[in-house]
Structures are given as structure tokens and as C-alpha cells.
Amino acid sequence: MTDLTKNPDLRSREKIDDYFGDWKWREGLAELMVPIVGRLYRHGVHIMIYGQSLVNKSPIDIMHAHRFVRQIEGNELSELETYPLLERLSSMDLPDCEVDIGELAMRCAFFDDLPNNPDSIDDFLLEQISADDIASRRPDKPQDIVLYGFGRIGRLMARMLAQTTGPGNYFRLRGVVVRKTGDNDLVKRASLLRRDSVHGRFDGTIRVDLENELLVINGNPVKFIYASSPLDVKYSDLDIHSPIVIDNTGIWRDEETLSQHLSSGASKVILTAPAKGDIRNIVFGVNDSALKESDKIISAASCTTNAIVPVLKLISDNYGISNGHIETVHSYTNDQNLIDNFHKGDRRGRSAPLNMVITSTGAVKAVSKAIPELKDKLTGNAIRVPTPNVSLAVLVLNLDRSVERDELNKFLKTSAFASKYREIIGYTNSPEAVSTDFYSSPYATIIDSQATIADGKQITLYCWYDNEYGYTKQVLNLTKKVASIDLQRFPKAIEDSV
């Protein structure tokens, strides 16, 4: 008699083990999903699986996203579960929104009812996604966006903006302001955008239009504007109207100097560095509700601030924090020297690829701007290390009450995947995870649960973050918030649906 076993890919179905046949079956379904996902996206509906976008993904990428679910639910998700949902979604008349088919599949008794009763799929989807409750927010004209600077953050932002235009009605990258470096400046900048030593090749197309000084990125014509300061630019003369300017140079950080962008015609200015003075430092997902329409200049804080604040907010709200210390193990950055040379900062003049460099960080001071109750409760320092990307924040915290390690990890896992923080906090339970595994991670921070320590009221958390990509994603989210782009996501987070 043939031994029948439960196939983990089919969950509750029993069949003779045929792993290759099953894999090819699911690969075929993933191939069928690609055009449906693309068509929905062009009409304003963004499909994802547990926060991972399926837009412009290959069938293998889609299969990887399904397998990722095992880290969350303890069981792999099958394309046999998600494909019928996606197929029926494509026939629904949905306003612009985001739909997580992974979460939808895990919330329904799929194999019990749906295959034999297709109508029940529609009933389930209508129960989880009420189109009547979605306000159509698609504007008549997209918001113009200008990048001031085209370094690490600027180029990643250009990639993200081009790859997430959706139906094209929300925002458009219209211009990039840089200082001209030579006659072949535009060609070289196109090459830097197309190829990246850390994040790989740009997943799109770039055409250089030298005559008009344009880069056409995924069909979006982007004007390159050569200027030495914001006052050298007049956006309206370039048919760019009231743009949101994202200043990623780090040169100007106070209200007086950043106001130069407003004089050039900008409607809002977002600084990708900690601001000086009274400018609001905003960490998306934590204190962005404090934004006011009257705020013309805001700061997206730093990459480290965006990595630690969401986790600190979670812990503070649920356990209380009496005090603590945060140590940042940070990849070297462009402001350090490649080889030993003069640098105005202490120790930063020593060769970045050869040394661990103890330095200061302003991230801890910035925490109190987002979480006022933690003012004067935290200390912090940073160590620059010889890696090009991905950093690690070590949070040693003394709590108001005791907590066990398993309880703490369960809380963090639930918060990462089923709360309002699910867009910005990631979670891994892999005992083999290392820094390069988090290249191009879209999360502001990823909790390494295997490294969690809890001893009474003292805990130690290890939080990975892609200090380039994850931070840029936070800046993108903040930009959408400033532009009043707010697409509802379905199904709603469990805490929001109660």
C-alpha cells in the first residue's frame, strides 16, 4: 500500500508525494498571476503577500513570497489558495486600494468550502473588502516631485518613484537638481541609476535624452536641472508646478536655508536627514499624525532613528521603558574616507573599509521628538564597520515590568505582521540570518528574534535595517503622506477590524 502523507504545500489535502509535479503545478499558477497583478496595478489596485509587493515580480519571486509566509504562520502558503482569490478580485470593480492576498487566504477556510462553491469566494471577498467604504482619492493631476541631489538616497528614491507610479495619477518624478560635473554628466548619472553595486540593476528601463537633458525612466521623462543652489532654480519656468522637493544632499538642515526651496517654487520640502531647530522630525508610522497642512518643511529624520523609533514605541506602549542604551553597528558611509586622510570629525578620517570606527549618533536624541515620554531616558553611540550596507541597532532596555523571551518575541511577531506597524517592522526567526540577507529590505527595521534576550525587566533586542533602501522606503511613505496619498489596505489589520 502506498504511503499517503500530508503535503505541506497543499496543507490539509492528502496525496501521494509528488514534489516536482506539485511544484510545476504551483509554478504554472504563479505564471498566471503575473498578468493579473500587472493589470490590477495599472488600474490602481496593488496586490501583495504579507506586505511584499507582487508588482513586476517573476513567477519565482511570487513563489518565494508564498513560501515566506511560513515565517509568520508556521505553514507555507500555496498558490492553490491565492490564485482563485486573485482571479475573482480581478473581476471586482474596486477603487484604488492595496490588497494582501496572503492575509486574505489565511483568513478563510479555503479547502473546506471554496473549491466546490465559487460563489463563496465572492461572498468572502465582499466581506473582507467593502468597496463602498473606500473613498476614491485619485487626483485629477499627479503631484510633481523633485529630487534635490542624486546620491545614494536620491537614486534609490528615483527607482522607487518610477516603480510605484501605479496608474500614474498620484505622483510623478519631474526633475532632479544636481551640480554639473562635465559634458557626459547625464550619461554617467544614468549609468549610476541603472547599476548599483549593492542593490543590483534597476528593474526597469532608462533612456538618455541628451538634447532635452532628460532621463526617461520607465516612461517618465525626468528633467535634470543643473544648479549650485536652490535659488538658481525656478520650477515654474520648467513646467514643474508646486513640487514636493526631497532634499537628499544634507547640505541645508535648518529652516532658513531649506526655505530657499520654497522660494524656488516648492510647495513642501522633505529633508532626508535630521533637522536643526524647530523643524518637525517625522518617523513615518509613528508620529506622522502630527503633520499639519501648515508644515512646509519637515525632516524624515535619519535611517537609524527610523529603525529604532518604531520598536521603541512598541515596547514603551506595552511594557514601559525606564531607561536604556542603544548601540548602532553602522555600515560606512560616503562622508568617511576611503583611505586615511584629514576629516573634521573625530576618527572618521581613518580608512572606512579597514577599520571599525567609534563615532557619535544623533539618532537617540531624535527619539524624544517622536516619543516625548522617552526624553532623557536613553543613551547611544555608534560604531562604523567595514560593510557597504545594512546596519544593526542593539537596544538594551530596562522595562517597567518583567517579560519572558518567548512572550516578548510573540508580541513582536504579532506586531510586525498583524498591526499598524506591519509596513515598517519586519521580523525574522532564521538562526542563520546575516547582514547581506537584508539588502534592499523595504522595512525600516527587522527584528532578529533568535538574538532576543530577556532577563526579568532587562531586554536586549537586535534590529537589522537597510540604512539605504529601508530608509528610502520610509521617505517615500512620508512623501505620499505629505501628498495626501492614502490608499486603504485590505484586509484590515486585526487590531483595526475589532
Image: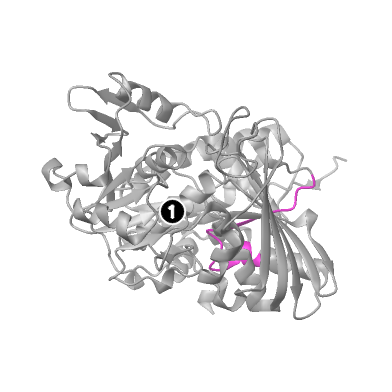
Q: Is residue 36 left or right of residue 76?
A: left
Element under label 1? Answer: helix
The magenta segment:
414-431
- Mark 1 lies on residue: 475
- Comparing 153 with 51, the one in front is 153
Residue at x 53%, y 34% (from the top left corner) = 199
Residue 460 point in image, percent of width and height? 77, 62
Instruction: Name the residue type under label 1.
Output: Val
Q: Is residue 127 above or below residue 119?
A: below
**Pointer 1: residues within 10 angstroms few (<14), some, or many (20+)?**
many
Q: Quadrant of residue 381?
A: bottom right
Q: Quadrant of residue 208?
A: top left
Q: Is residue 413 above or below residue 234?
A: below
- Comparing 319 with 237, the one in front is 237
Q: Is residue 122 above or below residue 178?
A: below
Quarter of the picture containing the N terminus is top right
